[in-house]
Amino acid sequence: MAVQQADRIIMHLDMDYFFAAVEERRKPELKGRPVVVGADPKEGRGRGVVSTCNYEARKFGIRSGMPISRAWQLCPEAAYLPVDFTMYRDASEEIMNIARKHARKVEQVSIDEAYMDATDMGDYDKALRLAERIRQEIKNSQNLTCSIGIGPNKLVAKIATDLKKPDAITTIKPDEVRQKVWPLSVGKLLGVGKKTAGRLREMGIRTIGDLAASDVSMLMAELGTMGYEFHQMANGMDERPVEEYWEPKSISREVTFEKDVNDSNMLTEMLEQLSKEVHKEAIDSSYSFRTITLKIRFSDFETHTKSRTVNITNSYELMAETAKELSKPFLTGRKAIRLVGVKASNLVYNYGQKSVGEFMAQTHKESSHIPDNF
Ligand SMILES: [Mg+2]
């Protein structure tokens, strides 16, 4: 494979089953037991989802994103714990500080994941030793394990991380892409979901190697510009830089009702509550917003979203009123509502109020741990 971009060395750090690991750290008696962090299972009647689970729980088939009721069916004897955002955020901050101490450039991409640019190390052996130091320090000072992938870009580094977990460091050098990446399923590529994987399969493309060997114009005819991008990725090409600061694209909250709701007062109350939470997080993180989105899921899982863009604001009233107005067309009484969500996006950061450190710590609250399916 050809790496045409300037040679870089990128590392991808991913904490192992992060929420569950932080819970185990707090309660060592949980070690060795299946641990599920997420909604209250209510003895199988709970309606939310699994947020994270440890490896013992995975042995029972439990996965993040799975309905909590299903997890309960699979393993009622697991320890079920509620999500404690504050504790995970504090741990995340400590870990990212360790990464920043060692690597020149760190881009945190979620509460427990970051890319680091290690090009200045000069070669893969030195980058590996750097990764080893980071892994050790996280283990010694935080009592948590992580996995690190090293490669010529973000894409390959992340694939490397996923090759071996937990508590592992995996390197994929440019000339190893053929041997280590090509045998993997196309679903491992960024942006290839079940649907796209299905289409590719129909075209006889199963592995990343199949994709790399496919004719680009044929891929583009079938998939448009995505076809081109997938072909690039399959060949191990990815030029996205490691960017130190990122901003959340949105802040959102959603809730699944205990029982499907047909009562407009209850819905209104919930929309006010969700708006309050979204608004508080926006204000705490020094954001104003322009777009408010409502999400509604009916009892038959039919799902709608509706957005409205307003003049830049940080008004709670405007957020709540907009959410309520957007909900009106759905209150026909014909179908009960299972889930509602409120999202603020088109965020604008109010500079000058906080230090960069505070800014970083706060912006990371969003996106990774709040299921955002808008
Ligand atoms: Mg992780």
Image (spheres, rainbow, N blue to C red):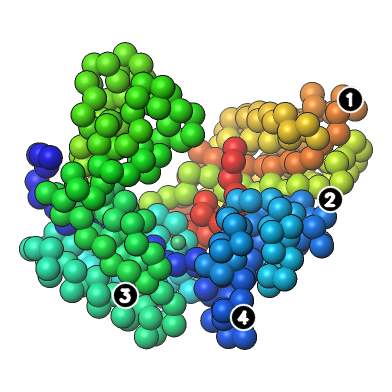
Q: Is the residue at mark 4 in contact range of ligand 1, meaning its CB lies under 8 Å from it?
A: no
Q: Earlier in the sequence, mark 4 or mark 3?
A: 4
| Neighbour tally class for label 4: few under 14, some 14-19, many 20 plus, Cα within 10 Å | some
For discs 1 and 4, the disc positioned in front in the rendered view: 4
List the residue tagged with mark 3.
135
CA separation in Å, label 1 and label 3 = 55 Å
Left or right relative to 182: residue 189: right
User: SS of the residue at dot 2?
Assistant: strand
Q: Can you name the residue that lies furthest to the top here? A: 221
The answer to whether the residue labelled 1 contacts the one labelled 2, judged by CB atoms less than 8 Å apart, is: no
Of the residues shown, which amino acid type is indicated by label 3? Arg
CA separation in Å, label 3 and label 2 = 41 Å
The answer to whether the residue labelled 1 contacts the one labelled 4, judged by CB atoms less than 8 Å apart, is: no
In this view, 243 is above or below 310: below
Q: Nearer the viewer, residue 271 or 22?
A: 22
CA separation in Å, label 4 and label 2 = 28 Å
Left or right relative to 319: residue 65: left
User: SS of the residue at dot 1?
Assistant: loop
Left or right relative to 108: residue 214: left
Q: Earlier in the sequence, mark 1 or mark 2?
A: 2
CA separation in Å, label 1 and label 4 = 46 Å
List the residue tagged with mark 4.
30
